[in-house]
Image (spheres, rainbow, N blue to C red):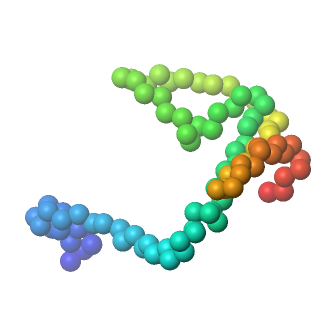
Amino acid sequence: MSKATVWRVLHKRLVVKPYCIQMVQQLSDDHFLEKVQFSDETTLHVSSVVNRRNVRIWGSENPHAYVEHQCDSPKVNVFCAISSEKGYSPFLFAEETVLA
């Protein structure tokens, strides 16, 4: 019996759905949040280029929009962090100073 047949029987006849198992770990440290630091970084383009993976255009039909952009435009990397004790100011890095 093929895998597709088994999945079809499970889904349509037995009305069950596949679920992924999520592994979790119990935190036994009472002061855990005091030790956590959150950080993030982003790359900003000087030419106003927008990361298309994070942009959606909602509408009743496809706008077929075209946007011209400059190849290899200058960029600035920004990094900042926060902990329970303090926030770390954003650090700006010119494109040439950050190693990939």
Q: Residue at x 40, y 24 (%)?
A: 59
Examine the rendered structure and indicate whether residue 63 appears above or below residue 37: above
Q: Nearer the viewer, residue 8 or 91?
A: 91
Q: Residue at x 73, y 37 (%)?
A: 44
Q: Nearer the viewer, residue 59 or 79?
A: 79
Q: Nearer the viewer, residue 52 or 7?
A: 52
Dividing the picture into quarters, in which one does residue 91 lie? top right
Residue 8 in view, yes or no: no
Q: Nearer the viewer, residue 11 or 5?
A: 11
Q: Residue at x 58, y 63 (%)?
A: 33
Residue 92, x across and y down, in percent: 82, 43
**Residue 39 vs residue 2: left or right?**
right
**Residue 50 vs residue 90: left or right?**
left
Examine the rendered structure and indicate whether residue 47 appears above or below residue 27: above
Residue 96, x across and y down, in percent: 89, 47
Residue 71, x across and y down, in percent: 77, 35
Residue 85, x across and y down, in percent: 69, 55
In this view, the residue farthest toward the right is 97
Query: Quadrant where the C terminus lies?
Result: bottom right
